[in-house]
Amino acid sequence: MTVLVTGGAGYIGSHMVHALVDAGERVVVLDNLATGFDWAVARGAVLVIGDCGDQPQVSALIAEYEIDAIVHFAASIVVPDSVRDPLGYYRNNTVNSRALIEAAVRRSVRHFIFSSTAAVYGNPARIPAHEDDPTVPTSPYGSSKLMTEIMLRDAGAAHGLRYMMLRYFNVAGADPLGRTGQSTRGATHLIKVAVETALGLRPRLSVFGTDYPTPDGTCIRDYIHVSDLIAAHRNALAHLRAGGPSATLNCGYGRGFSVLEVIESVKRVSGVDFKVEFTGRRAGDPAQLVAACDRVRAMLNWEPRFDDLATIVSHALDWERRLQRVPVVSA
């Protein structure tokens, strides 16, 4: 049995590849290296340069390596960019995912894990957001992911493809062993931007919007450590292989922090009082996103190990310092 990981040279995907290789799995990574790095792929995994929307290539990989499971991370992920370029996001996130799902069905792949997002909820009807709550995305990014969820669910019903759709809340931190982390130039993730600012790599940090209906006026998010997220993926794969049912699950901790609270945490952990500027809202940003996560804990027997904002920030800061010692060359 072999696991195909699309986007396995990127931030979250590379953590998954390390975890699978650590567990003795055979792993093939398919990545176009648009935002990923070949050096981030764990030794022992096969790296194939290509696109998950290339059906002939995907079909050939499934046959050659006897792929029994696909973990699909490859996607464009920046909400404001999706507002500016919706068709590009629908092509990369939705059209390519459709091609990948079809290749999996035609080649009788048994298990499919999809990297979805809390953005499918839009401005949630309640906090925390539950998996059965209405999905009303406020950005093309969220819509592109929701469309893939719908296709995967329908393909599962029609063809017996068993799946797990994991809706990520805000992923942050880095591998505690220092092997991989968020390395993309110009990344927009708050904790990544904040630690870069603390290290002097950015002149200031911008806060987008201070008039949201939250206690301090800034957006609230549920931050999950990337290693805990990957543990949920490993458990999801074991669940499917054991004959467990398909499901859609939130991945978060069930507790939110505002933008200002995150900034204060980064200042405290780093010991640097960096410059912060306040500006208007960004298009597509919901006021609050916090996960109801009872279902993932119960179904996947998932117990997070790094449920602490200071720990998440510390690991992100350690990784950023490592990047400065070892220059990253874009693949």
Image (cartoon, rainbow, N blue to C red):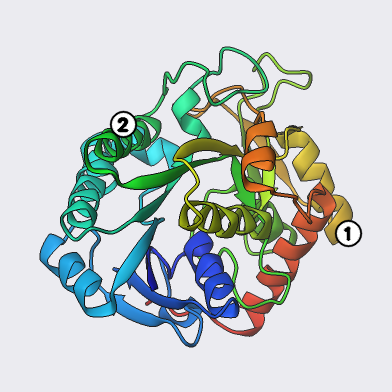
Whether residue 200 is visible to the viewer of this picture, yes or no, is: yes
Closer-to-camera residue (56/182): 56
Whether residue 252 is visible to the viewer of this picture, yes or no, is: no
The amino acid sitting under disc 2 is Ile
The residue depicted at 79 percent of the width and 51 percent of the height is: 266
Q: Position of residue 235 (x, y in %)?
A: 59, 55
Q: Position of residue 101 (x, y in %)?
A: 24, 49
Give the quarter of the image for residue 305: bottom right
The amino acid sitting under disc 1 is Gly
In the image, is residue 288 above or below residue 321?
above
Element under disc 1: loop
Q: Position of residue 65 (x, y in %)?
A: 28, 78
Give the quarter of the image for residue 103: bottom left
Looking at the image, is mark 1 or mark 2 nearer the viewer? 2
> In the rendered view, does 162 fall on the left or right side of 203?
left
Element under disc 2: helix
User: Local crowd at mark 1 within 10 Å, few (<14), some, or many (≥20)?
Assistant: few
> In the rendered view, does 133 fall on the left or right side of 60?
right
The residue depicted at 37 percent of the width and 82 percent of the height is: 46
Most extreme residue toward the front, as rendered?
A: 243
- Please give the label number shown on residue 150: 2
In the image, is residue 268 above or below residue 31?
above
The first of marks 1 and 2 along the sequence is: 2
- Please give the label number shown on residue 271: 1
